[in-house]
Image: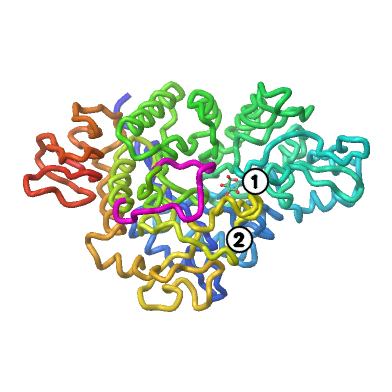
Amino acid sequence: MGQPTPARKDRDWWRTAVIYQVYVRSFADGDGDGTGDLAGVRARLPYLAGLGVDALWFSPWYRSPMTDGGYDVADYRAIDPAFGTLAEAEKLIAEARESGIRTIVDIVPNHVSDRHPWFRAALAAGPGSPERALFHFRPGRGTHGELPPNDWPSQFTGSTEPVWTRLPDGDWYLHLFTPGQPDLNWAHPAVRREHEDILRFWFERGVAGVRIDSAALLAKDPDLPDLASRPHPHPFVDRDELHDVYRSWRRLADAYDGVFVGEVWLPDAERLARYLRPDELHTAFNFSFLSCPWDAPRLRTAIDTTLAEHAPVGAPPTWVLCNHDVTRTVTRYGRADTAFDFGTKAFGTPTDLILGTRRARAAALLSLALPGSVYVYQGEELGLPEAEIPVARIQDPMYHRSDGADPGRDGCRVPLPWVDGMPYAGFSTQDPWLPQPVDWTSYAVDRQQRDPDSMLSLYREAIALRPVFGDASLTWLPAPDGVLAFARAEGAVCVVNLAPTPAVLPAHSRLLLSSGPLDEAGRLPQDTAAWLRV
Ligand code: GLC
């Protein structure tokens, strides 16, 4: 077959890309109101270009009451006024592209905001109306309809709240997340048509890809049966009907060379791979890698399973250490339990940030050396820890809906520190929407830019060097217990030592990069990774 042509290579950018997640609200504030915005992102494009990322994934930037941080969309074709305007988004997409950076938007198809015109119309139209058929409205159970229509659990782990809300007219409506996020009825043709039109709208505006929120939840068993009585197939997770939806999305995207990344949280890698068949989604987030503890055999299994399940469908894997929903990496790796699990998050978990940071540096080199694409969540490149938000200022519905048992996700959404010594670390000129911890300026971008040993310098160097690994497959090298060592392409090797004893590096011609210093004997200390030219 020979070498791919440059045009083909360009079209395949997503197979090896480094994609940076922008949570707009907390990235940079351009107008000084305490909330990040598109002006802030545009002003910081040189920073992102300097970091070397290939694409930006924007968490939802649409008009929204922000009940769930924008994952409650009132208008999929408008930018929230707090963030800017559609014209500005178009400028941002174009300017980023001029800097060599593509744009990925975040589409939320499972539910809309309760302020979405469709839901307002459904409320007004009353029980049995065609407007209500776009959602899941049902009468309640019990003598007076006072009990919810079924037993489905909330998709916010730990939530004590029901997924049904009753209206004064007696009908109940389904919302797998908050009551502000009514679920759409994906068996309705108008729902499918509308979403295809939304995709077209954004592809026409030059976006290169779409992240699909809650991608495995859209289809529901039409009977809405109790989960306890009919668990298989699951009434709302990973239903077979979904694949038909994504096949038609794929046909649409192909006309624009657009790509998809699905948010598909499924424990079963084989089921996940079904979404990645050649005529469905291009990629999906690798949550098994994200959730994996800092443990060599477990990581190796996660990597092997990922590779084995992706290979038959020809989809590149993705490598993700964190995002806007999970505990920041340096914090997670600094705890006794280094796995991520929504069910075990708790306030006040003891954390060793020095240890966590050392491991996170090694994990960065590990994930950037693996075959496939890599996601970097804003602030990960600064080594930001999970912040403890004073309870009175917590905004995340996950906290409120769990009656305060779950600390929520605000701790990983705190506005970025840009400038040391400036009020609010240069994020804004006003108290930001979430408070920054007192030591936030020690992580400031300008400070890290001056420090060759900073997390930011490590990420920048690693992203620049990453092409040495090419797009070749991975071969494990013999290594002692607790050491992960693999070769990629011609002569690039990654070694990660998770064992207490320093590891002797394989023979090499050059040490390209390491996440920390080697010892006096040139060995790789515990929780350190190195890239070698051999
Ligand atoms: C996804 C998002 C999360 C949101 C949920 C509901 O999991 O990543 O932030 O709360 O969907 O839209």
User: Do the numbered discs 1 and 2 sit on residues whose CB atoms are within 8 Å?
Assistant: no
Relative vertical location of residue 503 with respect to residue 480 in this rendering, above or below: below
Q: Is residue 82 left or right of residue 372?
A: right
**Which residue lies at the image location 38% right of the left edge and 64% below the top edge?**
46
Question: Residue 469 colored magenta?
Answer: no
Figure quadrant of residue 140? top right
Spot occupied by residue 210 in the image (x, y as percentages of width and height): 55, 44
Q: How far is the residue under mark 1 from the one under mark 2? A: 15 Å
Residue 89 shows in this picture: yes
Q: Is residue 269 left or right of residue 381?
A: right
Q: How many marks?
A: 2
Q: Is mark 2 within 8 Å of ligand 1?
A: no
Q: Amino acid at mark 1?
A: Ser
Per the image, the residue denoted by label 2 is 395
Q: Which residue is mark 1?
A: 159
Q: How is the image coloured?
A: rainbow
Specify the amino acid type for callout 2: Gln
Mark 2 crowd level (few <14, some 14–19, many ≥20, 10 Å Cα)? some
Q: Out of 272 and 140, give the one closest to the viewer.
A: 140
| Along the viewing direction, whichever of 138 and 256 lies nearer the viewer | 138
- Give the magenta-colored segment's residue range: 338-355
Single out the mark in the foreground, 1 or 2: 1
Q: Secondary structure at mark 2?
A: loop
Q: Position of residue 7 (x, y in %)?
A: 39, 39
Tell me what residue is drawn at x 65 percent, y 52 percent. Answer: 403
Q: Does label 1 or label 2 sit earlier along the sequence?
A: 1
Work out which quarter of the rendered image holds the N terminus and state it.
top left
Quarter-wise, where is residue 35 in the image? Answer: bottom right
